[in-house]
Each structure stands twice: as C-alpha cells, then as structure tokens.
Image (cartoon, grey):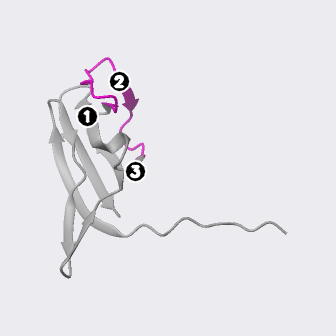
Amino acid sequence: MATTIQPPPLIPLLYQQIDLTTVQTLIPPTVVVDGDSYKARTAHIIAEGNGYRYRDDGVNPTDAVGMPVDVGQPAKFENAATQMLDLRVVSQVGTSKLNISWYR
C-alpha cells in the first residue's frame, strides 16, 4: 500500500492589502511571534478592481508583459528562497487592490 505524505499545514503570519498602480516588489515579511522570528514562505494573492501581472525573474512587468492574473483568480507563490525573493507586480489597468495572506 502506498503512503501519502502530506505537506505541513500553512500557518498564517500576516494579512496585507495594497493598492497597486506602479511596479512593486513583494518582499516576504519576517514576523515575530512570542519572541521567535518567522520568515514568510508562501503568499496567497487575490486581486480586486483590476487584474495584475507579475514576473519573478528580476525584471519589471508592464501592463502588457508578464504573467497575467485576473480579478478574483487566486495566485499562490511558495518558497521565499526562489521566486518570492524578487516577485514584482503591476496593475494591468489603473489600480488593482491586492489582498495578500502570508504564511510560514
């Protein structure tokens, strides 16, 4: 019989909401809980208002270039050691409101 290995549960660290009009780099926060520091390793992002684009290769996205994410479409970014060290986002049109939940 095969054994299923479950990933560890996500533990919430921080909720953040940003109004996105220009390119921003999303930096995983470090949060102190009961005297211990925890670096966020996962981000769940949902946009309101307008979609956005992201790039994780160190280059700024534009309103026409980058990976598109539609309004209400959840996006999950994991592992701060790779793609989240330089995750850059920009609104596709006007202003996007990004709702971000950070987890360790």
Magenta stretch bounds: 54-75
Q: Is residue 42 magenta?
A: no
The secondary element bearing badge 1 is classed as strand
Q: Earlier in the sequence, mark 2 or mark 1?
A: 2
Label 3 CA crowd tier, 10 Å (few <14, some 14–19, many 20+): some
Q: Is residue 23 visible?
A: yes
| Residue type at numbered disc 1 | Arg
Q: Earlier in the sequence, mark 1 or mark 3?
A: 3
| Residue type at numbered disc 3 | Asn
Q: Is residue 66 magenta?
A: yes
What distance separates the C-alpha of mark 2 from that of mark 3?
20 Å
Question: Is the residue under label 1 in contact with that under label 2 (CB below 8 Å)?
Answer: yes
Q: Which residue lies under the disc numbered 2?
A: 66
The secondary element bearing badge 2 is classed as loop
Seen at 28% across and 28% down, the residue is 58
Is residue 67 placed above or below 4 in the rendered structure?
A: above
The secondary element bearing badge 3 is classed as loop
What distance separates the C-alpha of mark 2 from that of mark 1?
9 Å
Label 2 CA crowd tier, 10 Å (few <14, some 14–19, many 20+): some
Q: Which residue lies under the disc numbered 3?
A: 79
Quarter of the image for residue 102 reads bottom left
Q: Which residue lies under the disc numbered 1?
A: 88
Horizontal and vertical percent position of residue 86: 27, 37
User: Mark number for residue 65?
Assistant: none
